[in-house]
């Protein structure tokens, strides 16, 4: 059965029918904070820049800004996850770890290979394509609308003990033990 979610965007109600619950519905409830983007709008299709290069996109991570997180925050993790990938476990497109608590924004393209545009101390885990960079959306033809969750999580630790070759799923396990608050934008793509 599909769940209905209503999202308020600039005073206009938008109802989204998702084929499954959010990736966070089975996790303990935590406070939220504000996450905005010049490149991504809640419930709207991703732009070409955030699509995979093999689909005519740029594999460019979106600009993100956040505020209103708990004062006890010691670091942030940023991820992008496609819960509708036909894998049985979704698909992790991006995972940035150990973003200092003093950082409240990432520029567009910060997820490029090598991580040179990331703030000091922050680094990227390999995504599910085993690349330590942002991988743009690439929903396979015939799999319907995919829902991409771009998430910033506030943590109670400055660093996480995740190995450089670790997986985003393992990162998620560690993050769940240290989450103070979470904010996300959900965008879509379809081929």
Image: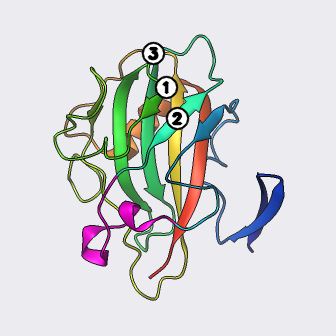
- Contact? badges 1 and 2 (CB < 8 Å): yes
- The quarter of the image holding the C terminus is bottom left
Residue 117, image quadrant: top left
Q: Which mark is residue 65?
A: 2
As measured in the structure, the alpha-carbon distance from the residue carrying label 3 to the one carrying label 2 is: 12 Å
Foreground residue among 180 and 35:
35
Q: Is residue 34 left or right of residue 144?
A: right
- Residue hosting label 3: 102
Residue 176 point in image, percent of width and height: 52, 32
Q: Residue at x 38, y 25 (%)?
A: 99
Q: Quadrant of residue 51?
A: bottom left
Does residue 177 show up?
no
Element on which disc 2 rests: strand
| Quadrant that contains the N terminus | bottom right
The vertical placement of 162 against 5, above or below, is above
Instruction: Kindly identify which numbered label has been placed on residue 147.
Output: none
Q: What is the span of residues highlighted in magenta in the rendered image?
A: 46-60
Which numbered disc, 3 or 2, marks the residue that appears first in the sequence? 2
The residue where tag 1 is placed is: 104
Query: How many other residues sit within 10 Å of disc 3, few (<14), some (14-19) or many (≥20)?
Result: few
Task: Tell me: residue 95, above or below residue 20.
Answer: above
Residue 181 in picture, x, y percent from top left: 62, 28
Would residue 69 be found to the left or right of residue 65 on screen?
Answer: right
SS type, badge 3: loop
Percent position of residue 101, x then y: 46, 17
Q: Residues within 10 Å of mark 2 (few under 14, many from 20)?
A: some
Residue 38 on the magenta span: no
Q: Residue at x 49, y 25 (%)?
A: 104
Between residues 27 and 31, which one lies in front from this camera angle? 31
Dot 1: within a 10 Å radius of its alpha carbon, few (fewer than 14), some, or many (20 or more) residues? Answer: some
Whole-number angstrom distance, CA of label 3 to CA of label 1: 6 Å
């Amino acid at each position: 059965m599909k769940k209905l979610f209503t999202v308020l965007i600039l005073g206009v109600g938008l109802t989204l029918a998702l084929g499954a619950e959010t990736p966070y519905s089975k996790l303990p409830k935590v406070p939220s904070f504000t996450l905005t983007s010049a490149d991504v709008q809640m419930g709207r299709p991703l732009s070409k820049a955030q699509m995979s290069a093999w689909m005519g996109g740029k594999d460019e991570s979106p600009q993100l800004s956040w505020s209103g997180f708990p004062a006890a925050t010691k670091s942030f993790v940023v991820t992008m996850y496609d819960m509708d990938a036909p894998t049985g476990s979704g698909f992790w497109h991006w995972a940035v770890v150990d973003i200092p608590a003093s950082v409240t924004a990432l520029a567009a393209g910060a997820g490029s290979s090598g991580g040179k545009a990331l703030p000091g101390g922050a680094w990227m885990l390999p995504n599910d394509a085993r690349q330590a960079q942002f991988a743009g959306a690439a929903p396979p033809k015939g799999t319907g609308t995919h829902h991409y969750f771009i998430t910033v999580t506030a943590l109670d630790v400055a660093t996480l003990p995740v190995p450089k070759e670790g997986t985003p799923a393992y990162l998620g396990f560690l993050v769940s033990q240290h989450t103070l608050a979470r904010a996300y934008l959900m965008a879509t793509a379809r081929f």
